[in-house]
Amino acid sequence: MNENNYPKLHNAMWPGVVGKGGDSEPVIPFDTMLDLTAAAEVDGVKFDGVDLALFEHIDVNLSDDEIKKLADKVGGYNLKIGSLVAPIWGGSAMGSKEERATFVEMVRKACHIGQKLTELGIRPSGVVRIDSSTSPTVWDADPTANSKLIAQTFREACDVAADYGEKLAAEGEICWGGMHSWKTMLETLELVDRPNMGFQADMAHTLLYTMGYNREQDRILPPDFDWSDRKALSEALRTLTNALRPWTIDFHVAQNDGTVFGSGSHDKTGRHCQALDPNGKLDVVHDAGYWLRDENGQLTKAFKHICWDGCMFPNSVMNTQQTWNDILATMIKVRQQHGWYE
């Protein structure tokens, strides 16, 4: 067994929530997600922790006593806590003054929880994740002005986060305006220009960046791309990661079949596939290296944990233990190839 013990291996809790509820399938309870995560084991190796969504499962308005109970609960499973998703969708980052104030306040509440969890010793690493909370279509009405407004909101959120010792990671996903292509994402990050602002790369979402979904002029791969051309795909992933890797402070291991999908109230975005999906277009273990290593092949060690993200799977898949064992096995291979020992 490979000796690497970093990066730590986390499971995301929000796949129990995202794309669920309403006309879709029921939300999978937080305790069930913890049970499945803690029960996963491959050759004696288990998940080290979980990344949390501060919505549905967990109320962003937790009191300090309730934060302590949350820490005790997760710690009782022998798991740590990592990154947190701030529930910023009550107001767009390029919306009215009131909406943007609501956005920043949600970031503040998330950072308070993050700081408390860190103080309690349950959260050794992690960021607070945000997005623009608006669609590419709305953004497209006035790209220059809207990107400036998003950046202004993000700067205010960064200043608040800094008071709590937190970093913010912008989620690279094609459904968020101003973040929906690799070039618009890069422009937004450069406009924000704060030391505690970074990028969250999710392999399923960033693959779609190479295909120009929602922003054709920024595609890297040709429109009629032949997925058997591994050399061209590798070159495209290199172009993408060389641009965004220097900003990357949070990382999701994931698979994608090159299509988009949405369920429940969630807009269409990168289709997360199961770890061993035969239709997956990524060589997950190899391609994780483009994010975890620099252009010279050296480990960046830019984050202390990595997280699996697989959303909008049917509940029958989510409630099957083998699903999580397969995911864990894939993440172990990522750490064997691109990890380190401390």
Image: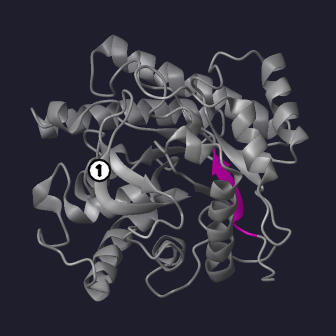
Amino acid type of the residue that numbered disc 1 sits on in the rendered structure: Val
Q: Residue at x 73, y 69 (%)?
A: 6
Q: Nearer the viewer, residue 281 or 197?
A: 281
> Where 26 sits versus 278, above or below?
above
Q: Residue at x 57, y 42 (%)?
A: 316
Q: Position of residue 174 (x, y in %)?
A: 29, 47
Find the magenta span and give its range.
6-12
Total marks placed: 1
Q: Nearer the viewer, residue 305 or 331?
A: 331
Q: Position of residue 246 (x, y in %)?
A: 44, 66
Q: Residue furthest top?
A: 98
Label the magenta part by its dominant secondary structure: strand
> Where 339 sits versus 134, above or below?
below
100 to the left or right of 168: left
Residue 331, quarter of picture: bottom right
**Quarter that holds the N terminus:** bottom right
Residue 121, quarter of picture: top right
Residue 156 on the magenta segment = no
Check the image and tell me how it is coloured. Answer: one colour
Q: Position of residue 20 (x, y in %)?
A: 48, 29
Q: Residue furthest front?
A: 316
**Quarter that holds the C terminus:** bottom right
Whether residue 123 is visible: no
Secondary structure beneath label 1: strand
125 to the left or right of 88: right
The residue under label 1 is 260
Report crowding for label 1: few under 14, some 14 to 19, many 20 or more residues within 10 A (C-alpha): some
Q: Residue at x 47, y 51 (%)?
A: 198
